[in-house]
Image (tube, coloured by chain):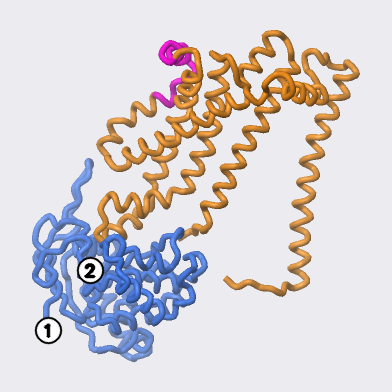
Chain colours: A blue, B orange
């Protein structure tokens, strides 16, 4: 398999007037093409920092991060970033929201627009093209947010607890939807979450981080293949994985 | 959103109750005004209060009519409207641009912040004599007064809005590779449309204060001039009549801004 993302002994230090904090210390792991990776760890372990580093939004203090052998840069066409909340712009219609990345990247061509509209169509949102975000449910809005990320055709998708703002029922079904969309579109994904069962339900591999400063503590390989999240939750070894990961996270 | 065409009886009853309540509030509102005017009129006409000092509604009404006929009231209105409107527009445009520059450059903001704060706390009327010396005793001095009074608040309101733009939305645009200019045009400006409308409302009130105060200090025409002139020659009818005209004008201009708000902000924001 091809390495898509390489994280090589990356450290990150936050500087404020009062203090300096080592958030990430000598972090290394690889992500292969087509994989779904989850990064979990105790709360406050710097998961979001790791994602921001991969997205090129923060420059690493030491070490380097490569995507297809080139250093990452914010706004790279290879990257898509999905945040906790959908962050749809309330003054824009759904389709205009989906076109934002194209506008920013100055690629608002008819082809690109049609690709976005096709995605909306494929995932049941066509009738809401001209609606405003407040007219959609939380789950639908999160699907729009994913399509907005996919419209620029990224190879690597970064997900920062994208379901945590949703209620439990919606979270399960949106997680299932998002998993299907991501596998169908053949995108590699890195999910950051504090929700262990969510990580088990979507991942090929799970990377467990230590307490701050973050290091890789353990990497688990799951054997579910392309089983969908809801199906995985029904399997018998789901709770075994949960127990194992829970111990790994809480153990010091 | 689903539009329910057929409502239940309960819902119709609920809607009717809401509507009746609104009508009742309107009736009370106008009754209160009518009552106040009536009491004023009766007390003044029967000399319970001195009509020479207080004037009274019917007299004010006839004075307004008289002013229209003989005394170039329209000219006075025109002068004040011109000064207020120009002061308002200059403050809004300047305030918006300065706030934007202060958002774009953190260093610029840090340098300018204390100046803005000090200028804001200074009672601008104290600068009246300086303004008259600098701009002369005409329209220009009054417009300068209006601008001086409203521009600082415009800057502070707008900058406050710009700075409180959702950090996660900025992060989202950055993840698409947006530069500062794109973040400004795609996010910071459109998301602050409600702040802008707020600023218009504040700036309008301030511009009125500035123009009338300016006319008190130095003027040959305008509603503020009529009010000062009326009080100097002890024609309270004139003072009251001009004040009423001023009241109507400022209410009309405020109504225009509210209309603009309705037309411009067609979407709903939500807690997300």
Classify 10 Å Cα crowding around label 2: few (below 14), some (14-19), many (20 and above). Answer: many
Q: How far apart are marks 1 and 2 (CA)?
A: 19 Å
Residue at figure coordinates x 87%, y 21% from the top left: B43
Please tell me which residue is depicted at 34% across the width and 53% down the height of the picture: B167
Q: Is residue A204 above or below residue A195?
A: below
**Which label sits in the foreground, 1 or 2?**
2
Q: Is residue B131 magenta?
A: yes
Determine whether label 1 and label 2 are within 8 Å by CB: no
Which chain does the residue under circle 2 lie in? Answer: A
Magenta residues, dominant SS class = helix
- Of marks 1 and 2, which one's residue comes earlier in the chain? 1
Is disc 2 on the same chain as disc 1?
yes
Q: Mark 1 points at which residue?
A: A1
Give whichever of A191, B156 is nearer the camera: B156
| Image quadrant where residue B61 sits | top right
- For label 2, the residue is A79
Q: Is mark 2 on a helix, strand or loop?
A: strand
Which part of the image, by quadrant, shows the N terminus of chain B? bottom right
Please determine whether, in this image, residue B58 is positioned above or below residue A152: above
Q: What element carries label 1?
A: loop
Q: Position of residue B45 (x, y in %)?
A: 88, 19
Question: Percent x, y for residue A99?
Answer: 35, 66
Magenta stretch, residue numbers? B119-135
Q: Which of A161 and A97 is in front in this view?
A: A97
Is the residue marked by circle 1 packed among few (<14), some (14-19), or many (20+) residues within 10 Å? few
Residue B48 image offset from top left, x and y in percent: 88, 17
Chain of the residue where label 1 is placed in the rendered structure: A
Tell me the residue at 50%/34% (across/down).
B203
Q: Residue at x 35, y 51 (%)?
A: B185
Question: Would you place residue B13 above or below residue B202 in this image?
Answer: below
């Amino acid at each position: 398999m091809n390495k898509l993302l390489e994280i090589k002994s990356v450290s990150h230090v936050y500087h404020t007037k009062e203090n300096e904090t080592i958030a990430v210390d000598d972090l290394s792991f690889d992500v292969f093409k087509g994989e779904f990776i989850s990064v979990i760890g105790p709360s406050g372990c710097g998961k979001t920092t790791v994602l921001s580093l991969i997205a090129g939004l923060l420059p690493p203090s030491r070490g380097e991060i490569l995507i297809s052998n080139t250093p990452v840069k914010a706004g790279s066409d290879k990257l898509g970033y999905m945040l906790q909340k959908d962050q749809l712009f309330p003054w824009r219609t759904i389709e205009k929201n989906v076109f934002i990345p194209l506008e920013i990247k100055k690629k608002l061509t008819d082809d690109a627009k049609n690709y976005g509209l096709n995605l909306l169509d494929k995932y049941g949102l066509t009738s809401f093209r001209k609606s405003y975000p407040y007219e959609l449910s939380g789950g639908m809005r999160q699907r729009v947010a994913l399509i907005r990320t996919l419209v620029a055709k990224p190879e690597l998708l970064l997900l920062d607890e994208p379901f945590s703002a949703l209620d439990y029922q919606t979270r399960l079904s949106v997680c299932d939807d998002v998993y299907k969309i991501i596998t169908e579109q053949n995108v590699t994904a890195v999910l950051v979450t504090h929700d262990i069962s969510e990580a088990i339900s979507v991942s090929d591999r799970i990377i467990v981080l230590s307490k701050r400063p973050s290091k890789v503590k353990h990497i688990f390989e799951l054997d579910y293949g392309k089983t969908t999240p809801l199906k995985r939750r029904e399997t018998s070894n789901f709770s075994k994985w949960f127990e194992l990961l829970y111990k790994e996270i809480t153990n010091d | 959103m689903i539009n329910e065409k057929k409502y239940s009886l309960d819902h119709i009853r609920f809607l009717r109750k809401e509507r009746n309540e609104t009508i009742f509030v309107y009736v009370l509102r106008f009754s209160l005004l009518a009552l106040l005017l009536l009491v004023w009129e009766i007390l003044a006409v029967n000399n319970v209060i001195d009509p020479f000092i207080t004037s009274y509604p019917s007299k004010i009404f006839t004075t307004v009519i008289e002013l229209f006929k003989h005394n170039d009231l329209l000219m006075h209105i025109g002068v004040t409207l011109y000064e207020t409107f120009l002061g308002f527009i200059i403050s809004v445009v300047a305030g918006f641009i300065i706030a934007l520059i202060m958002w774009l450059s953190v260093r610029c903001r840090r340098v300018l912040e204390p100046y803005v704060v000090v200028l804001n706390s200074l009672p601008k009327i104290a600068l009246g004599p300086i303004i008259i010396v600098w701009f002369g005793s005409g329209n220009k001095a009054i417009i300068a007064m209006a601008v001086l009074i409203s521009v600082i608040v415009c800057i502070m309101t707008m900058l406050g809005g710009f700075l409180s733009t959702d950090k996660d939305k900025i992060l989202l645009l950055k993840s698409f590779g947006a530069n500062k200019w794109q973040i400004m045009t795609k996010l910071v400006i459109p998301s602050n449309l409600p702040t802008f409308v707020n600023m218009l409302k504040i700036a309008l009130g301030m511009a009125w204060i500035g123009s009338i105060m300016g006319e008190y200090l130095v003027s040959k025409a305008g509603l503020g001039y009529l009010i000062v002139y009326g009080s100097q020659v002890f024609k309270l009818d004139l003072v009251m009549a001009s004040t009423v005209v001023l009241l109507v004008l400022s209410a009309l201009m405020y109504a225009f801004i509210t209309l603009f708000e309705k037309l411009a902000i067609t979407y709903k924001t939500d807690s997300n």
